[in-house]
Image (spheres, grey):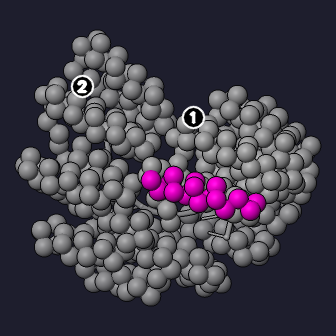
Amino acid sequence: VFTYNKLLLQLTREHRHDKASAMFQEMIDKSCQPDAFTFAILLRGLCRSNQLEKARQLLGRMKEMGCVPDDAIYNALISGYSKAKDFGQAFKFLAEMVKNHCLPTVVTYTNIVDGLCKAGRTKDAVKLLDEMRDKGCSPNIYTYNVIVEGLCEERKLDEAKKMLEEMAVRGYFPDVVTYNSFIKGLCKCDRVDEARKFLARMPVTPDVVSYTTVINGLCKSGDLDSASRMLDQMSNRGCTPDVVTYSSLIDGFCKGGEVERAMGLLDSMLKLGCRPNMVAYNSLLGALHRLGHIGKAEDMLVEMERRGFTPDVVSYNACIDGLCKAERVKKAKAVFDRMVERGCTPNVSSYSMLVEELCKKKELEEAITLVEQAREKYQIVDILLYTVLLDGLCKGGRFDEACALFSKVLDEKICEPD
RNA sequence: UGCAUUGAUCGGU
């Protein structure tokens, strides 16, 4: 069991959930009795890959096998359902765990608080802080960090600042994670300059995330030179840039149309022994397309594969987007087909870009077919995709069909309108 | 042997 658990943990960390399921089956076949750890590992994997239904089934199976769920099991499930914004189910599990004499811990509550914050419900999250205190469970640094992150994400910097003070009063001093969230908040509010100053004199030593957040902020504000200088600065101060730092800057150069500089940076990171991942290549792909260098982009795709990077859905989407914007919808569709052939699953973006462009080209029939295909083949039922098609039908003067489609979406509860 | 927080790449209005 120990050996299997270790292997399973390894597999879920590498996001190889199918392999993990297969290994679990193998355990059972070889009559190796899984324990609570086994199930916690598997549940976490399923929750992280959004397979909540399977997670719930696994809980049932666990009980059938006479294995008693402990707090880590419930925490994994509660975290999964909270992240999916299904708080009803999350609270059901909370009640169930209490009923089974398994006390909710600070981790349990922090998971829910995190879900609430990510769902944009920071008010409810703060309320839950009080509730957990009432129940004798004190929020810790993680809990406060989750709240600060949520407030910063919602650009409520004043409230975030108050929370920094409050946590200190309660004996939890803001750490580098707390401050990094705040830095990101400043950047989001277009206060990059303050973010830079904050970085320079924050009460704890900035880490690679702090620098990267500011570099990214500077890039998004169009100040590529300062961003570049910040890269040197962090190295001088003994903080080694990592793959995310480089990718941020590479993307900044790409978005600013400076593909040459981006390529140069890709070279220097290679020379410094920092291995790039798909992200940097995807940024470059997008840039080449935006500049209309379709041929170069194709070369890049080949080059990526040669270096051992299999293009992912973002790579293909970057190509599809570029080709659509260049009004080469036929070619975009060809890339789409190639992606599917290669076993890469398209997502909402892939479809919505194509559908939008097909609508513009008045190829409404094909657009309609694609939306149906997305639903039937991949269970993609995002309101975004329907909105694009509805917009296309309306602009194409086919109001009746648009209305009929909208009614169908509502009647058959295909997805919630926004 | 298992659980929670921060940074990078693609999409419509």
Which one is closest to the eye, mark 1 or mark 2? 1
Q: Which residues are magenta?
A: A396-411
| Quarter of the picture holding the N terminus of chain A | top left
Q: Are marks 1 and 2 on the same chain?
A: yes
Q: Is residue A266 found inside the magenta-colored segment of the image?
A: no
**Residue position for label 2:** A34
Tell me if I can see residue A350 in this picture: no
Image spot of residue A4 (x, y percent): 33, 24
Residue nearest the viewer, comparing A120 with A200 = A120
Please identify the quarter of the rendering in which residue A5 is found. top left
Q: Which chain is indicated by disc 1?
A: A
Count of numbered circles on the image: 2
Marks 1/2: CA distance?
Answer: 35 Å
Q: Is residue A399 found inside the magenta-colored segment of the image?
A: yes
Q: Is residue A1 left or right of residue A51?
A: left
Tag 1: residue type?
Answer: Lys
**Residue position for label 1:** A377
Image spot of residue A91 (x, y percent): 22, 57
